[in-house]
Image: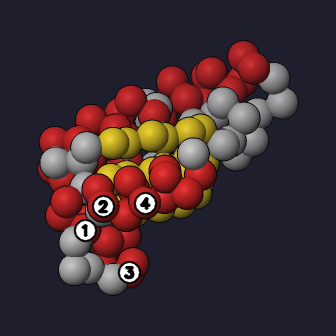
Amino acid sequence: MSAETDTQAAEVANATGITPASLQNPLREKLSAQHVHIEDISGGCGQAFEAIIVSPLFAQKTTLARHRLVNSCLKTEIAAIHAWTPRCFTPEEWERNQAREG
């Protein structure tokens, strides 16, 4: 579902109720996430999101296990959108990543 205008994009986002904030809150609460950044990459219609999630609960977990943990927290929300791309880091991994980029 793509929108041709900003107005259409806003209408679709309102219909699904999925916003970056509605995705961030459960992640912060359920995963004790220290950093969550979610970007709507759908052009504003709320159908595709990329996320960076930093949580100590990801320690000792594979990428697949991390994604499953995140997806279990957002099961209802993910069912309502078209695309979801999480990038999951432990706090230590995130600090190393930031130091390399900085």
Residue 54: x %, y % from top left: 33, 53
In this view of the protein, can residue 19 be seen by the observer? yes
Residue farthest to the top, as pictured: 7
Give the Cα distance between marks 4 and 3: 21 Å
User: Are the residues at dot 1 and dot 2 in contact (C-beta closer than 8 Å)?
Assistant: no
* Residue at 25 percent of width and 68 percent of height: 58
Secondary-structure class at tag 4? helix
Which quadrant of the view contains residue 39? top right
How dense is the environment of label 3, judged by Cα within 10 Å: few (below 14), some, or many (20 and up)?
few
On the rendered structure, is 84 left or right of 65? right
| Label located before the other in sequence (1 or 3) | 1
> Can you tell which mark lies on residue 58?
1
| Residue under numbered circle 4 | 96
Give the Cα distance between marks 4 and 1: 15 Å
| Residue under numbered circle 3 | 64
Which quadrant of the view contains residue 64? bottom left
Give the Cα distance between marks 2 and 3: 19 Å
Give the Cα distance between marks 1 and 3: 11 Å
| Residue under numbered circle 2 | 92
* Residue at 75 percent of width and 20 percent of height: 6
Give the Cα distance between marks 1 and 2: 10 Å
How dense is the environment of label 1, judged by Cα within 10 Å: few (below 14), some, or many (20 and up)?
many
How dense is the environment of label 4, judged by Cα within 10 Å: few (below 14), some, or many (20 and up)?
few
Residue farthest to the right, as pictured: 4
User: Are the residues at dot 4 and dot 2 in contact (C-beta closer than 8 Å)?
Assistant: yes
